[in-house]
């Protein structure tokens, strides 16, 4: 059973181009949302909310905004990087079955949020744990998830009527997929490559080192 769990971790992908658009069974959607809602949270505040977006017109407006932000980013790149970026699909907003927007409400449980007095971002970290739970549950259910990050928060807040004090943390594209790629998109397109675990390990205290030093030293 433990191997099945680790297999889900390894199969999880940030999906862009493999969505089929087929419906998600209501019971399946409820299971992955329940998994997200079961995440741990600082002070048991559960500072997240989930907005289910299946309206095509709303998704078209968001997709247009994301395309504009893509152009903003592309204009900042060198010629070589822009050429590589041109081949990378960054979202599946209209291809996926629906969008799930996950928000963060810092006022939930305030002012006495147990565990947040010294780390203001602890509530935001809690929301990210809920997102990870959702993502892994969706993968276990045979669904794909893609996190869209090319947007401005004020735009999405206005589009979905999100109150001013609440942050939209993620627009997740969710739905059945034709497959999950064996290699993540950014690696396949040569944008960036993973570093080995050995390069991220430190013992006792943080030790700055050259990117390739850990591999060369066999650490």
Image (cartoon, grey):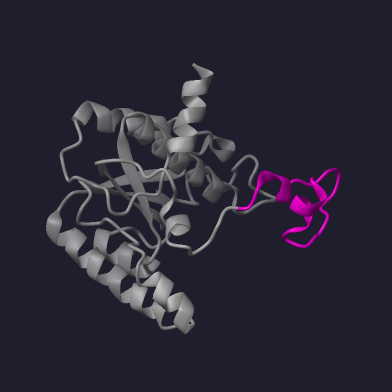
Q: Quadrant of residue 38?
A: top left
Indicate the position of residue 8 as horizontal and vertical percent values. Answer: 44, 31
Q: Position of residue 95 (x, y in %)?
A: 20, 53
Task: Tell me the quarter of the image containing the C terminus.
Answer: top right
Q: Residue at x 34, y 42 (%)?
A: 180
Q: Position of residue 201 (x, y in %)?
A: 75, 46
**Does the magenta-highlighted stretch encompass residue 42?**
no
The image quarter containing residue 208 is: bottom right
Kindly identify the residue that appears in the image at 80 percent across and 60 percent down: 209
For the residue pair 167 and 17, the one nearer the viewer reads as 17
The percent position of residue 51, horizontal first and vertical second, equals 29, 47
Residue stretch rendered in magenta on the structure: 195-219
Q: Is residue 219 left or right of residue 106?
A: right
Compared to residue 176, the image places residue 163 above or below, namely below
The one of 144 and 114 positioned closer to us in this rendering: 144
Tell me if residue 199 is in the magenta stretch: yes
Is residue 219 shown left or right of residue 53?
A: right
26 relative to 113 in the view: left or right: left
Q: Count the numbered circles shown.
A: 0
Q: Residue at x 65, y 41 (%)?
A: 115
Direction right: furthest residue: 204
Prevailing secondary structure of the magenta residues: loop
Q: Is residue 149 above or below residue 2?
A: below
């Amino acid at each position: 059973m433990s191997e099945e769990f680790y297999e889900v971790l390894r199969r999880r992908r940030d999906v862009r181009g493999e969505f089929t658009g087929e419906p998600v069974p209501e019971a399946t959607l409820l299971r992955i949302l329940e998994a997200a809602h079961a995440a741990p949270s600082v002070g048991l505040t559960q500072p997240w909310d989930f907005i289910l977006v299946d309206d095509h017109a709303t998704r078209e407006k968001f997709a247009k905004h994301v395309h504009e932000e893509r152009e903003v980013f592309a204009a900042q790149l060198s010629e070589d990087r822009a050429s590589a970026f041109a081949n990378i699909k960054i979202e599946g907003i209209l291809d996926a079955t629906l969008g799930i927007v996950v928000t963060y409400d810092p006022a939930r449980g305030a002012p006495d949020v147990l565990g947040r007095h010294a780390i203001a971002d602890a509530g935001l970290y809690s929301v990210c744990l809920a997102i990870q739970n959702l993502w892994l549950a969706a993968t276990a259910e045979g669904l794909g998830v893609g996190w869209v990050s090319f947007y401005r928060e004020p735009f999405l807040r206005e589009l979905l009527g999100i109150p001013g004090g609440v942050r939209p943390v993620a627009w997740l594209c969710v739905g059945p997929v034709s497959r999950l790629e064996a290699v993540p998109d950014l690696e396949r397109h040569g944008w960036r490559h993973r570093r080995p675990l050995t390069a991220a390990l430190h013992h006792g205290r943080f030790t700055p080192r050259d990117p390739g030093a850990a591999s060369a030293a066999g650490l």
